[in-house]
Every structure is written in structure tokens, then in C-alpha cells.
Amino acid sequence: MYSALKQSFNTCVCAPSASLPPLPKLLVLSSVAICEPLHNIQQLYAPPPPTLPSKLVLPIRKHRQLIHDNSVPDSGYASAEEEDCDYEVDDIVVAGSCDDDDLEILRADPLERAFVIKWLTAFIARSDAWASADDLEEIEADRRAEAVETASRLLSVLLGVDQEEEEDCSVTRFFQFPTQGGTFVKVELNDAPLSNEDHTCVGLQSWASSVVLSERICADPARFSLSSFTNTSGSPLRILELGAGTGLLSIIARKLLSSLHASASIFATDYHPEVLLNLCANIATNFPSSAPPPISVHQLDWERPQYSAPMNEPFDLILGADVIYHPDHAQWIKACVERLLLRPTPSNSSTGTGGVFWLMMALRISGRHEGMFHTVEDIFPDASSSLTAGDQADDWQLAILEKSELGKLKGVGRADERGYLLFKIGWVPC
């Protein structure tokens, strides 16, 4: 196993850029060839707590003469008579062979650290074929599996440190998204620092999924039902954002519809009180002359939702980006969308119209949120999977109508994000 194997590794830490093996040759590398550089990374960026040497003998102090007054307790300070005392030292063992100053310099090198993050990310992305190669002995297969787990843990440590450094203070972010007409939709957002104790405040910051989805909406608003002035019944559009966070999607939708002089009611929802306060501030920043604000902010608890006004009427469009980071979230969100999304009516059931829910998910390749998009696929069936039209108007269920994978934008997103999945979810007969 890796824990046993690492005992034979060199205890002196090397520069990662000079010691990490090239990944194009990964399939021909053994577990030893991977575990040794992983051990090197661990010693550099996540060292275990120091332990006492296996052999440690304390210095033996011998006085040439007794302290002159035994009646006075020793205060802990050396007396004049002790200044000339002799020491006999037997076999003091010094652990480690690397210079601590050199180690600290290497650990603080931002280029080395960036290189390690990039290597670990690429290794994890390619690890499936390497860890499950044919004709592996059981011990080798176990070592490879443990190596992948170790790489994922080290990447999480490095990304966690980076995230802490980035989240120490509020940051003002400026976005501009090109439109079909050659203009830009401009947005200014405040990203507030996150709390390490409260995971429900993640909406204080803008996540890459919302940025990527905003770019798509601005490039093709008609696809997202944002080029129409009204819904099929002739009423103004009702738009809901789940887990709005900093409010980027709601602000984008409002600005696009305003450019078309379209009337719509937009409701941005979240759970955490601090997130809601920051959301209101961002709306005020982007619409300084609007009174009342053109986006209504409300608290919504997916687990225990309250469907009082304005949640007592259905929505034509529901938006959500990076809102699922716990296995229960997909189930809670489905229940909310079933209640809140406009259903097809008897008059339009033949065309299958109704509201649409657009959901963007990050494809994370490591950490505790790895593979979370699978919970969406488990909860919402695929529309093409043996669904037949029912005879009753209310005989409908939510299903995935479309699914597309999107790449990362340059300079946007965390290192553990491989890309993004965009789900179009709507009503299908069952």
C-alpha cells in the first residue's frame, strides 16, 4: 500500500517541476513511479505533524560544585555557579536531511505550486485508465487506487488553501457579455468573504457556472425564452432564480429584457440572510435609478419551502447555476420545481408547452463535490426513455429535455472544474 511503500522513498523534498513524471507516459508507469512524487508533494505542501526521533537522549548536566544554598527554591534561572557547568551528550539524533530554509522557499514558490495543481488535476483526469489497467496484480491495483485517492486529497488541500487566500476580503467583479446585436451586457457584483463555519453562505461569491450560463443566455436569449415579451397566455413573463447568490443570472435576464422593452417579473431567491443582503446590494448597484428594484428578492428554503405569494403562482422560466452541492439538493429542488414551474394546459398539451427549468452544473473531478451532477441524472429521467403521452391533462412529469457539456472559459472557474453540464428540464407526458 502507499502508506507502507512511502517508507522507502527519499526523505529529501525535491522541486515538483523537476520530479513529477510526464503524464503522456502515465499508462506505462508503475504505482511506485507515481507514489514517490506524490509523497514528495505531501512532504512539501501537507507534511505530517513532527514526531520525536526514534532515539533521543537528553543532555546530562553535571555541576562542578553544589549550589551554595539548598534552603532557597530554584527560581528557574541559572545561578552564577552554574555558568561553568559541563555537559555530557550521548547520541543526539537529528531527524531529516533537508535544509528547512530551502524547504520554505520551495513551498512558497507560486510557480511550483501552480505546476503541482495542474499536474494533479491532469493526473486525476487521466487516472481511470491507469488505475483500471488490464492484468494488474491485486497489490498493484490497490496501490494505484490509493495513489488516486492521495492525489485527490492533495489537490483538495492545495485548492482549499488557495480558496482561503482568495476569500479573505470582499472583491468587486466586473463582467461584460457580448450579445447578438454587437453590444454588451455589463454587470458589477460584490463577492463577499465566505464563512468557514457555515456552508449555506456559499452564495456570497460568484461561481463559474453562473458566468458560463450568463454568456450563453446573452449570446442566444431566444433559446432561453428571453426574447418574448409575454408567455403563451399573453401575460408578462414570470422568472425565478433558485440559489441566486450574487444575482448574476437575474440581473442578466432583467437587462436583456429591458433592452427589448419587455415586461417581466423576476424573483431572485436564496436561503442565507447574509447572501440575501448582498444580493439586494448587487441589484441596487446595477439598477441605481430604479425604484422599486426591478428584481424582487425572497428567501426560499428548498427543504421546507413556503409557497405563499409570490410563490403561489407558476413561473414560465426557472434558472439555477451550481446550486447542487449535497446529494439531497437535487431531490429538494425537483420538488420545488414541480410545484413552481408552469405546467402544460389542456389547450396546449398537444404541443407539449409549459415552463422550462435551466440548470447548470460544474463537472468537478475531485473533492467532496466530485460527480455531484449524477444526482440530477438520477432524479430527473431522460425525456427519451420510454415516455408515452397520457390521456389526462395533468399526467405530466419533469424530465431532462436536453443535456450539453460546455468547456471552461479562460480565467474562469476553479482548478477542479473540468467543464460544465447544462440541463434543460421540462414537462413530458407520462
Image (spheres, helix red, strand yellow):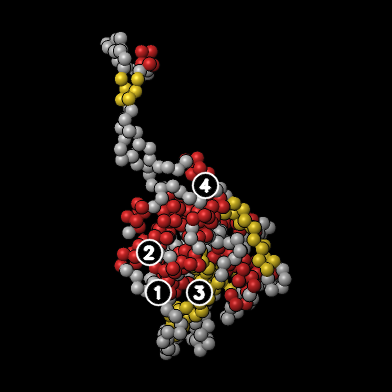
Marks counted in the figure total 4
Gap between marks 2 and 1 measured at Cα: 29 Å
Under circle 4, the secondary element is helix
Marks 1/4 in contact by CB < 8 Å: the verdict is no
- Read off the residue under disc 3: 423
Of callouts 2 and 1, which one flags the residue occurring earlier in the amino acid sequence? 2
> Which residue type does callout 3 highlight?
Phe
Please, what is the three-letter code of the amino acid marked with disc 1?
Asp
State the SS at label 1: helix
Q: State the image coordinates of residue 39 (x, y, percent, origin top left).
A: 41, 53
Instruction: Quote the CA–CA distance across marks 1 and 4.
Output: 45 Å
The residues bearing labels 3 and 2 have C-alpha atoms spaced at a distance of: 34 Å
- Of marks 1 and 3, which one's residue comes earlier in the chain? 1
**What is the spatial separation of the Cα atoms under label 4 and label 3, in whole angstroms?**
43 Å
Q: Relative to 351, is 133 on the left or the right?
A: left
**Considering the numbered disc 3 on the image, is that residue within a helix, a strand or a loop?**
strand
Residue assigned mark 1: 378
Mark 4–mark 2 distance (CA, rounded to whole Å): 27 Å
Query: Do the residues bearing badges 1 and 3 touch, measured as CB atoms within 8 Å?
Result: no
Residue 282 in view = yes
For image coordinates 50% across by 54% down, the residue present is 16
Q: Amino acid at mark 2?
A: Arg
* Front residue of this view, candidates 367 and 60: 60
First in sequence: mark 4 or mark 3?
Answer: 4
Left or right of residue 37, residue 221 in this image: right
> Are the two marked residues, 4 and 3, in contact with CB atoms closer than 8 angstroms?
no
